[in-house]
Image (cartoon, coloured by chain):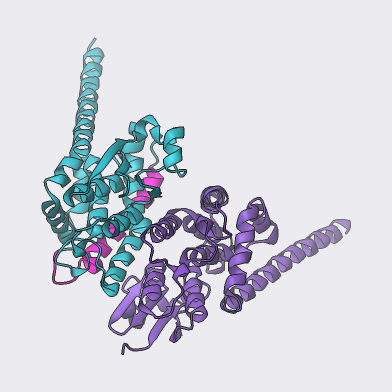
Chain colours: A purple, B cyan
């Protein structure tokens, strides 16, 4: 009997959320160990022993230590009994197709989303400078990826990726990437997402198919969203106060 | 009996070479269909039907059209009889480890190597402007990736990735990425690679394990390397002639 599964995760991390939702939904017995990236816990000696690449998510299962979220999701699908086939089909063709969108994700949707959100909201929140040029380039990749999701990957009879009728680990991984856009200014987020009707519908369908675990695992992100909204409101209000002060001075 | 395998490739493309070497080495019966990227063949309507993402490599096998080289390599390992297990082990734990390095590759070695080579040699060769800033940033990622290969991924008793005694599809994929550095100026390539002794040894071991097919699939790249070397020599020589002419004029 292998030891209990340990999942090293930060719920602000998109791939961590996908792994946590998958475990909860499939009744996998595991211990969640929080690795707080904003406090640099991922650089600690203890965590570096778990993952020398110092990234989350990572898992320990008996003698196996494993990192990279797609490898983890595939492993969990295969190593635990009773996981429904649609998550990672045993059929060689269906599996190949799921693998291809998982591969495509790294350099496309993930790259565009991470760099856009880092360079507009999350980076500054961790003390990094705003980088409008990098944000603009990342936005191009993000929009191109959304277009390919809308017109290619979501083609077919079903409501999930590759025209499937039920979600796979690819749906979970990519939708958890897109929820990170929640921290953006609401107008910005809407400007980016709203042209892609199929994508917006697919995010909802994946959420529905994996609730209540989806919502629960996303609570930290929603709290962060609220915090950023309040910060933006305060900045907007103090901008107005400054104008009033200047007006009063000029009358003297 | 499924239809014959069609592989749509350009041998100047790193992931294409990995697929071709794998097929030849394993005696897979297939037809190689050249898609010349330099001539924009990947944008043709015929190829877009094979792969709507317009990228190589792509395969057609019966009713299956498949793209993304790692998904293709995994599929070929599973779909054809008699492929030795070490290429993509059926053992869940060993397979998970290989999946993790295949995943890591996209945003690390591939990202760094591809962008560095594009912004220094291959981009200008097809008319794109040089971008020293992008090259410098890509070089950081490339060197960091080489360091992780040297110190983490090549740890273990065997000579291949993950300490294995025989190569997997991960060795083939990553080594074919690194051979692209052949087109660089020899001093530049030496500067980048020579600190990484294990990496250099591993490239040779992978080459040896997959010859003569490795050399054969790299012939086009070696010819391109020669062409770039000759161009660099001509530029260097014409620089010297210009100085001589100015000397003669100033004496008049």
Which residue occupies the extreme right position in the image? A251
User: Residue placed farthest to the front in the image?
Assistant: B1
Residue B152 among those drawn in magenta: yes
Residue B93 percent coordinates (x, y): 28, 74
Q: Is residue B61 magenta?
A: no
Q: Is residue A129 left or right of residue B234?
A: right
Residue A13 visible at all: yes
Q: Nearer the viewer, residue A202 or A33?
A: A202
| Residue B147 location (% of width, % of height) | 26, 62
Question: Residue B138: where, in percent of width, then height?
Answer: 36, 51
Front in this rendered view, residue A243 or A88: A88
- Specify the segment rendered in magenta: B132-159
Quick check: A234 left or right of B232?
Answer: right
Residue for point 63% across, 52% down: A196
Residue A183 shown left or right of residue B130 in the figure: right
Q: Is residue A164 above or below residue B243?
A: below
Quarter location, residue B123: top left
Q: Is residue A38 visible?
A: no
Residue pictured at 63% horizontal, 62% vertical: A184
Which image quadrant for residue B241? top left
Q: Residue at x 40, y 59 (%)?
A: A99
Above or below B163: residue A160: above
């Amino acid at each position: 009997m292998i030891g209990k599964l340990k999942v090293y995760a930060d719920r602000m991390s998109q791939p961590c959320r996908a792994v946590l939702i998958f475990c909860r939904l499939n009744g996998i017995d595991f211990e969640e160990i929080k690795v707080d990236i904003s406090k640099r816990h991922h650089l600690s000696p203890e965590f570096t022993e778990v993952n020398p690449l110092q990234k989350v998510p990572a898992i320990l299962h008996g003698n196996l230590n494993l990192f990279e979220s797609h490898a983890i999701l595939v492993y969990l699908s295969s190593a635990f009994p009773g996981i429904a086939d649609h998550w990672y089909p045993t059929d060689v063709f269906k599996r190949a197709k799921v693998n291809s969108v998982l591969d495509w994700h790294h350099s496309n949707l993930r790259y565009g989303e991470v760099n856009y959100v880092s360079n507009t909201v999350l980076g500054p929140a961790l003390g990094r400078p705003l980088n409008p040029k990098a944000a603009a380039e990342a936005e191009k990749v993000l929009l191109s990826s959304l277009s390919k999701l809308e017109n290619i990957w979501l083609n077919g009879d079903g409501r999930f990726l590759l025209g499937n009728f039920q979600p796979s680990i690819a749906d979970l991984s990519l939708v958890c990437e897109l929820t990170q856009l929640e921290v953006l200014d609401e107008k910005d987020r809407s400007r980016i997402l709203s042209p892609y009707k199929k994508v917006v519908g697919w995010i909802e369908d994946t959420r529905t198919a994996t609730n209540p675990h989806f919502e629960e695992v996303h609570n930290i992100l929603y709290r962060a969203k609220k915090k950023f909204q309040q910060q933006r409101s305060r900045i907007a209000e103090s901008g107005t106060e400054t104008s009033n002060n200047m007006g009063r001075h000029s009358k003297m």
